[in-house]
Image (tube, rainbow, N blue to C red):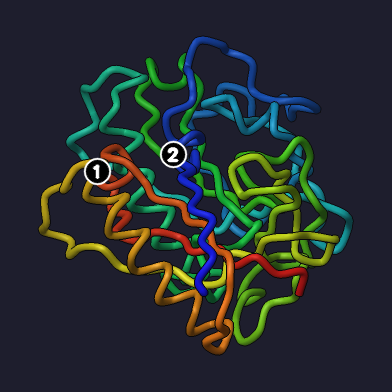
Amino acid sequence: MLHRVVVVLALALLAPVLASCGSESQGGNTDDDLVDSVEMPESGVCRSLTPEDVALPANATKTVPCSEEHTAETFATGKLPAEFDDVEYDDASLGAFAYRTCSTAFAKFVGADESLVLRTTLSWAWFRPSEKAWKKGARWYRCDVLGGSTASTSYRPLPETAEGMLAGRPPDVWLSCARGPSVGEGEKVPCSQKHDWRAVTTVKLGQPEDEYPGDRVMESRTRSFCATSVKAWLNYPAEFEYGFTFFHKAEWDAGIRRSVCWARTGE
């Protein structure tokens, strides 16, 4: 007898990419030398960022030694391509570029494959110059790894460097679980905490060149593939419960071709 708990949940992976640009605040505890700076940021530096800082398009928070407690590390910086020289500050194409660029660099930096990237409590954020610096011609991006996800109300401290931290078998503190009657209704927690659901696998639903198949097709395929995938992960029990997360057109257009499968398990 097969018990299924089918949960449809749209994760807000693109929230940092599409954040509002309406405020000129540049984060808390700012460095006067970085406020409105036109210079390309330094990579390999650390900061103590909060979700409130990450919600802003620009950031000038002071750096801290990576040997001290911190919640963010800059892992990639660069000059924006020439196609962005004349675009508006909040042009949507900037977010799409940042997603492609930072997500690829993030996976390589932390040592995660396509599946693990969608199942970790780590995330990343990107920043651009301030609007004042943008008007002066500044065209750069900065990608930071964060000790939490878009759902986090606070971030966990990172190790001295996040480079390679998900390679091999990552510790449960950096893996995604949920506590509650279902994935959709439950509280998202690290798997090191008491939990009822664990994100155990992902399933691939298309190739890079494929058009978005629509929500109904995505849900149907995800439901079917996750049932098989979770059953195998649980070593083919007679009864089991599972949930799933599928993404929508915005995430598909950004390059996501996988859905996440959750198993009901306290382990």
Circle 2 residue: 14
Q: Position of residue 146 (x, y in %)?
A: 66, 51
Q: Nearer the viewer, residue 1 or 92?
A: 1
Please give the name of the residue rendered at 69% of the width and 49% of the height, measured from the top-left corner: 148
Circle 1 residue: 216
- Disc 2 secondary structure class: loop
- Disc 1 secondary structure class: helix
Please state if 32 lies on the left or on the right of 137 as rendered. right
Tell me if label 1 and label 2 are in contact, CB under 8 Å: no
Please state if 178 lies on the left or on the right of 184 as rendered. right
- Identify the image quadrant of residue 27: top right
Please give the name of the residue rendered at 20% of the width and 38% of the height, measured from the top-left corner: 82
Q: CA distance from mark 1 to mark 2?
A: 21 Å
Circle 1 packing at 10 Å, graded few (<14), some (14-19), many (20+), is few
Q: Given the image, on which type of amino acid does mark 1 rest?
A: Arg
Q: Nearer the viewer, residue 172 or 52?
A: 172
Q: Nearer the viewer, residue 147 or 189?
A: 189
Please give the name of the residue rendered at 56% of the width and 49% of the height, measured from the top-left corner: 124
Residue 202 numbered mark, or none: none
